[in-house]
Image (tube, helix red, strand yellow):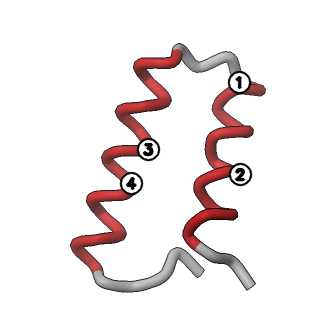
Amino acid sequence: MVTLQTWRERMSGNMRLRDFRPRTQEGYLAATRQFVDWTNKDPS
């Protein structure tokens, strides 16, 4: 089962592997968090 925490960790790991800059990672994570909050659903 995918939880919000494991999904976030996996997303962060993928961005690090692709050499995204730290500020880009922060922006993407914030945007996806806002989207998840807006939809009121789990990422799974």
| Residue at mark 4 to residue at mark 1: CA–CA distance | 18 Å
Residue 18 image label: 1
Residue 40 vs residue 9: left or right?
Answer: left
Q: Of all residues shown, which one is farthest toward the front?
A: 5
Q: Amino acid at mark 4?
A: Thr
Q: Of all residues shown, which one is farthest toward the left?
A: 38
Asked if the residue at tag 3 contacts the one at tag 2, i.e. Cβ–Cβ closer than 8 Å, the answer is no
Residue receiving disc 3: 29
Where residue 15 sits, quadrant-wise, is: top right
What kind of element bears circle 2? helix
Residue sitting at 52 percent across and 75 percent down? 43
Residue sitting at 28 percent across and 71 percent down? 37
Mark 4 and mark 2 lie on one chain; the one further toward the N terminus is 2
| Residue at mark 1 to residue at mark 3: CA–CA distance | 15 Å
Q: Amino acid at mark 2?
A: Arg
Q: Give percent across and percent down for residue 27.
A: 35, 33
Residue 23 vs 35, above or below: the answer is above
Disc 3 packing (10 Å; few <14; some 14–19; many ≥20): some
